Amino acid sequence: MDREVMSRIAHARHPVKSPLDDDSVRELLEQGVPHEGARVLDLGCGGGEWLVRALAASPGLRAEGVDVSLDALEQAREAADRLGVGDRLSLHHGTAADFRSPHPFDLVLSVGATHAFGGLLPTLAAARERLAPGGRVLIGEGFWVGEPSPGALELFGDDLTDLATTLDRVAADGWTPVHGHVSTRRELDGYEWSCWGSLAAWALDHPDHPDSAEALETSAIRRGEWLRLYRDCWGFVTLVLRRTHA
């Protein structure tokens, strides 16, 4: 089954592709957008969920998104047009690391997409290059709540640390958190149930589809990985950051 199609089905019932509920997304955007006429950039925007929400909440805001997936960008365009904010959204096809713009941005987002740059600190370096003076970064990253299992390390890599060390790394890199949110157990579990439940429901609703069996098997495998390998040791933090020095 095409990976992008599977991802679209899995995330169909969830507000964003990260373990955050509607209220958390709204508050993070309120804290992240510095003023009404801001320019916002999402590095790895996917289906544009963050950008469309920001545009709908702030009539004077302009937004740009970059992603390697044409399918995801089309979803973003359709969502923006449905809400009547498409005229303020520019979308770019390509890798986030290669994206260049003639102007800086007041808010740079990268939530759940730090893998595109090779980790948290390289993502912050990319955001810094694109940030206007006094701008903010909204970034989401996983961290270890407890001792990771070997299976969890295999899934997420060995670059993650505990929450305190994650914040120490951010501070040492020249950033100060001005807001943050640690995903609750309800958000973490809700995300997993939604993703793998949506995929399983699609498979059961389309028993004659050639990808039905694979989708059902994948949902069971991913649900098992969550429950057995990382549910008790993985967390997710989303930070609003400003440069510590001018």
Image (spheres, grey):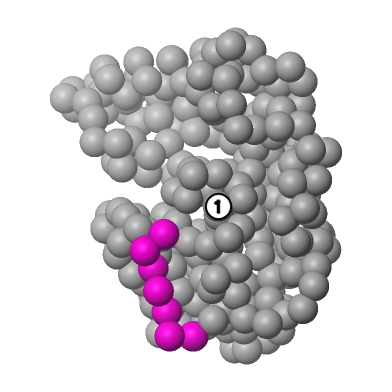
- What residue is rendered at 32% in x and 55% in y? 68
Q: Residues within 10 Å of mark 1 (few under 14, many from 20)?
A: some
Quadrant of residue 246 within the rendered picture: bottom right
Q: Secondary structure at mark 1?
A: helix
Tell me which residue sits at (41%, 59%) in the image. 97
Q: Is residue 147 visible?
A: yes
In this view of the protein, which residue sits in the foreground, 40 or 104? 104
Q: Position of residue 17 (x, y in %)?
A: 52, 46
126 vs 74, left or right, is: right
- Is residue 93 left or right of 158 when viewed as pictured? left
Label 1 belongs to which residue? 122
State the image quarter where residue 142 is shown: top right
Measured along the vertical axis of the image, is residue 214 above or below residue 67?
above
| 206 vs 110: above or below | above
Q: Quadrant of residue 96?
A: bottom left
Query: Closer to the camera, 152 or 203?
Result: 152
**Residue occupying image coordinates x 77% and y 53%:** 172
Q: Nearer the viewer, residue 85 or 124?
A: 124
Q: Position of residue 194 (x, y in %)?
A: 54, 34
Q: Quadrant of the N terminus?
A: top left
Total residue callouts? 1
Residue 190 visible, this orientation: no
Asked if the stretch drawn in magenta spans residue 98, the answer is yes
Whether 125 is among the magenta residues is: no
Question: Where 167 sits versus 51, above or below?
Answer: above
Residue type marked 1: Pro
Which residue occupies 49% across, 85% down? Answer: 103
Q: Is residue 241 above or below residue 218?
A: below
Magenta residues (range): 97-103
Prevailing secondary structure class for the magenta stretch in the rendered image? loop
| Residue 71 image position (x, y, % from top left) | 28, 54
Q: Where does residue 141 sit, x and y in percent of width and height?
A: 63, 44
